[in-house]
Amino acid sequence: MADLRLGLLLNAVSPAVGGVLVRGEKGTAKSTMVRALAGLLPSIAVVTDCRFACDPTAPDPQCPDGPHEAPGVDRPARLVELPVGVTEDRIVGSLDLERALAEGVKAYEPGLLAQAHRGVLYIDEVNLLQDHVVDLLLDAAAMGRSYVEREGVSVRHAARFLLVGTMNPEEGELRPQLLDRFGLTVEIAATRDPAERAEVVRRRLAYDADPAGFAARFAAEERELAERIGAARALLPAVGLGDAALRQITAVCAAFEVDGLRADIVMARTAVALAAWAGRTAVTEEDVRQAARLALPHRRRRNPFDAPGLDEEQLDRTLAEHAEQPDEPEPDGDGPDGDGPDGGGPDGDGPEQDGPGDGGPDGGGGAPEPAGPPTPDAATPAPDSPRDVPAPPAPRPAPARESAPVAAGEPYRTKLFKVPGTGRGAQGRRSPAETDGGHTIRARRPAGPLTRLHLAATLRAAAPHQVARGRAGRALLLRHDDFREQVRQGREANLVLFVVDASGSMAARQRMAAVKGAVLSLLMDAYQRRDKIGMITFRGRSAELALPPTSSVEVGAARLERLPTGGRTPLAAGLLRAHEVLRVERLRDPLRRPLLVVVTDGRATGGSAALAEAGRAAGLLAAQGTAAVVLDCESGPVRLGLARTLAGRLNASAVTLDELRADGVTALVHAHRSATTHRKAA
């Protein structure tokens, strides 16, 4: 936990570092450590009755509660927690558009960003938030100001806070462009030392028995830590970043090929904060090394399936290559060997060099002899002794007709498959849906507070009633029933459920590599379109839910890579398992529409009876209105067309591996044009 502790403390010393992202498995006290940080921060002075925590010595001139003349009061820094299902209005604040238009009053209710100003904003499970919400938070953290714009009515206020996010990578990664916005990242895991685990349990039980007494045991240590944070904050402006340290920072960022220049800036700020925390006024090479370990790992991802990481050996080499070289000493005139009063020879005062017969501290003469094989002990039987260790048991044979996992082919850009109709699911990039973003398609009466005013529709609704309402001047008289809100159409994220045939009919290595490459390509497409994914595999006599629906596409890729093949083809079992999984997911998340992707050649062990059973299972899915795509994996000169028959039962489209590529049609057109051009030239 040392890296997490250091990352939190550095942000407390210098919030300009940009926050910290905590990655780790569940049950590792991520939230506990973050909440403990708030108690270590110095208290702040705020203007009395200011909802935006303005500093009385330098109040925000744009504060909606200003101008301020009230005295200041001291209070502890706040820790504001952001729930996973938070809305945009709850974050930035809500503006009462009805009062703003009808009465000309800016009735603004501050959001969580205003509450977190000059404190800590904690986002648990940040990877489960919608991307536009995370981007909004990171924008505010970077600019130190929050903006609310609603139909020409604008409110802005200061929002400077220490940003901390936690996440479990098993539940999905943050996208690289959002990862880059966090200043530092740390990886944590539970200790495997039984003694340390026992101490954790011991302390937890002691806290549960007497919370106040437990806190009192560590009060002195916490007080010292808080004082050290205050001292480091005071020292921070005096810390200098020399040219040599800055060259090392930029060289490291260039060597690791990070995108943009944000990493260089964050590393510089982190190195300065490290020096201040250590009580120094100059940045050292060790500060640069530690800053790189905290600021670069999450900026090294090159594709969606890469895990954050840093090559420590490459870091050391780069720092050594760009270290400040000491000045060469001037010769002292006593000759090239340095013998004499100041030399290192036998007559000088310098340290004597070991001669050939010194043998180091043990006094053994000459070079050490190479170690030979150990001398057999009397109790150790010779190789030919009857007491030889018995031979290990023969390895257990692999199950019959099972092939080892085949590596996936290279992923490529695929066609876009959509769910028909218009949904109302979470914002994404796949199927049409009514969303908070997108283009306006119509107006309607608001069911709750008005957030997206449709001005033209509101005016049309109010215009016929102006005479009856006694309108005398130019101002329009509006009533609650006149207001209309925009209905916008954008795109939603879906649940993409893969049903993959892993039976013997798919076991040819070249064929399975192509199939895995196609599924991997669809997984990458799901990642880019913000979908959840799940995976069912069927082989032998049953179907298995290899990956329950999750946002972690990386886990899906890993499960696909390890997928073995072989055995019978229980196609109906795979479809029935998909029917059950989708039934449960509809109860859990009724707004997320599914897209079923069946990867098969259409064969089923058991002849026509098995195919008929698979057809009935497909009919169940079709009756539920499940959108589906069949990826036809059949190959060879003679094709039975069974996958296309299955697609007909599912009311689905069928595509071959060649047709899956987004550039497939384009390549055919280019080839046709090229051939035509050559024929004309000939």
Image (cartoon, rainbow, N blue to C red):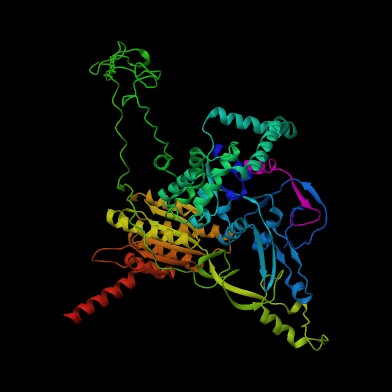
Taking depth in this image into account, of 393 and 248 the one nearest to the observer is 248
Q: Is residue 606 left or right of residue 4?
A: left
Horizontal and vertical percent for residue 228? 66, 36
Taking depth in this image into account, of 544 and 678 the one nearest to the observer is 678
**Residue at image coords 62%, 74%:** 487
Horizontal and vertical percent for residue 424? 58, 68
Q: Is residue 235 left or right of residue 322?
A: right
Give the residues in magenta.
Answer: 31-54
Question: Is residue 387 rendered magenta in the image?
Answer: no
Q: Residue furthest front?
A: 333
Q: Is residue 369 above or below residue 442?
A: above
Q: Residue furthest top?
A: 378
Question: Is residue 49 rendered magenta in the image?
Answer: yes
Q: Is residue 150 left or right of residue 278?
A: right
Q: Quadrant of residue 613?
A: bottom left
Taking depth in this image into account, of 46 and 307 the one nearest to the observer is 46
Q: Is residue 168 visible?
A: no
Horizontal and vertical percent for residue 669? 30, 75
Q: Quadrant of the N terminus?
A: top right
Q: Is residue 535 above or below residue 446?
A: above
Q: Quadrant of the C terminus?
A: bottom left
Q: Is residue 574 above or below residue 460?
A: above
